[in-house]
Image: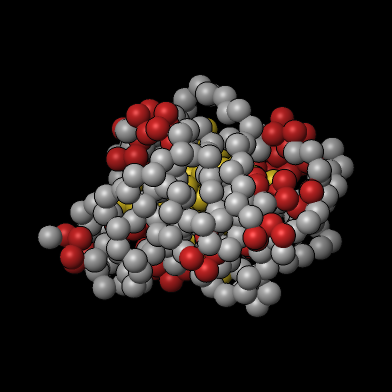
């Protein structure tokens, strides 16, 4: 496809700094966020350091040895790719994934301008990260109600209407993980240039407020395959989050290609709202066991890549 054969640096909308809010818990990423944001706005070519020292979580129930084999020397720049180039540094230390990063641009693999705009939004790693806007489940449901009332079409050539509703915000969201899997692995999807396989497609994460909630009450987060950290796998997500809420931070996105559950329909993938965190910038596991506790000041957060850091990282 034409989009796969060319490199295009895309500058997303001008982001606005928003009043900082907090979900009552701190992580190492919070303390340095103001310093990081300015640097992320320039395309960087420097290599990032290796993943920091691993720490133990959940009383030692998680241990090293679960990390997938992947390239060393994680990077926080897309400059090392031949095709996928963002206009900012990455919000995480990731690994070059040649199967997708050297073959698929930010516009994805569709010739439809609406799908290209949608793909650019799905691939937006450049939301302002000074401080996240804390979202809860009801806010995402309310956004869906507003979107339904606006009669939004599946094909949206101008996403300004969505940006006015909140698309592009850097958000923080706490929930339980009900499931996680590689999506569209047989035929791929447009945003990923229709390349089949696990490494070249998103990780779809089903998020609920209570572990036993019906999936139609769920919301969604998606991990992009572009420069995805080696530790970000469905298996690691499920193991790390067992019995503990998680916190995802990233780009707020409206996925109009799907339909939400209603009183009379249960379409796949099942969800209560088409508003989701996509792409995910960070995934952290809470030390506590309820969402209320994790919203408090005593909660401790461990990044997924640190939960499964290898023994060599601890040296």
Depth check: 208 or 149 in front? 149
Quarter of the view holding residue 307: bottom left
Q: Nearer the viewer, residue 123 or 242?
A: 123
User: How many numbered dots are placed on residues in this image?
Assistant: 0
Quarter holding the N terminus?
A: bottom right
Q: Residue at x 46, y 39 (%)?
A: 43
Q: Quadrant of the C terminus?
A: bottom left
Q: Is residue 152 left or right of residue 121?
A: right
* Farthest-out residue, left: 315
**Image point (69%, 57%), residue name:** 3
- Residue extending farthest bottom: 186
Figure coloring: secondary structure
Residue at point 44%, 42% (across, down): 89
Task: Determine which quarter of the picture holds residue 204.
Answer: bottom right
Q: Can I make out residue 83 in this image?
A: yes
Residue 248: image x %, image y %?
A: 47, 48
Q: Is residue 264 left or right of residue 199?
A: right
**In the figure, 62 relative to 224: above or below?**
below
Expressed as whole percent of the image width and height from the top left, the position of residue 164 reads 71, 30
Residue 285 appears anywhere in the view: no
* Picture coordinates of residue 125, whole percent (x, y): 52, 44
Percent of width and height locating residue 219? 62, 53
| Residue plotted at (62% across, 36% down) | 12
């Amino acid at each position: 496809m034409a989009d796969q054969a060319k490199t295009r640096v895309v500058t997303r909308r001008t982001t606005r700094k928003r009043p900082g809010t907090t979900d009552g818990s701190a992580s190492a990423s919070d303390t340095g966020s103001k310093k990081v944001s300015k640097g992320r706005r320039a395309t960087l070519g420097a290599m990032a350091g290796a993943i920091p020292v691993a720490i133990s979580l959940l009383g030692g129930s998680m241990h090293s040895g679960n990390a997938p084999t992947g390239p060393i020397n994680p990077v926080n720049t897309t400059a090392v790719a031949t095709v996928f180039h963002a206009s900012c540094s990455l919000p995480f230390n990731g690994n070059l994934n040649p199967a997708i990063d050297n073959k698929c641009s930010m516009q994805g693999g569709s010739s439809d301008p609406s799908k290209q705009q949608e793909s650019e939004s799905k691939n937006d790693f450049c939301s302002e990260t000074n401080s996240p806007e804390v979202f809860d489940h009801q806010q995402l449901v309310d956004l869906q109600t507003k979107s339904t009332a606006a009669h939004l079409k599946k094909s949206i050539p101008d996403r300004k209407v969505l940006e006015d509703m909140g698309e592009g915000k850097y958000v923080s969201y706490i929930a339980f993980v009900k499931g996680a899997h590689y999506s569209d692995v047989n035929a791929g999807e447009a945003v990923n240039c229709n390349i089949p396989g696990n490494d070249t497609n998103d990780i779809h994460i089903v998020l609920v407020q209570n572990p036993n909630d019906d999936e139609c009450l769920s919301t969604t987060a998606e991990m992009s395959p572009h420069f995805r950290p080696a530790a970000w796998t469905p298996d690691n997500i499920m193991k790390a989050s067992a019995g503990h809420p998680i916190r995802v931070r990233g780009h707020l996105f409206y996925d109009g290609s799907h339909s939400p559950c209603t009183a009379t329909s249960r379409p796949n993938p099942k969800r209560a709202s088409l508003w989701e965190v996509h792409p995910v910038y960070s995934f952290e596991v809470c030390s506590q066991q309820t969402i209320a506790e994790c919203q408090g000041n005593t909660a401790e957060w461990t990044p997924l890549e640190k939960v499964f850091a290898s023994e060599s990282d601890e040296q």
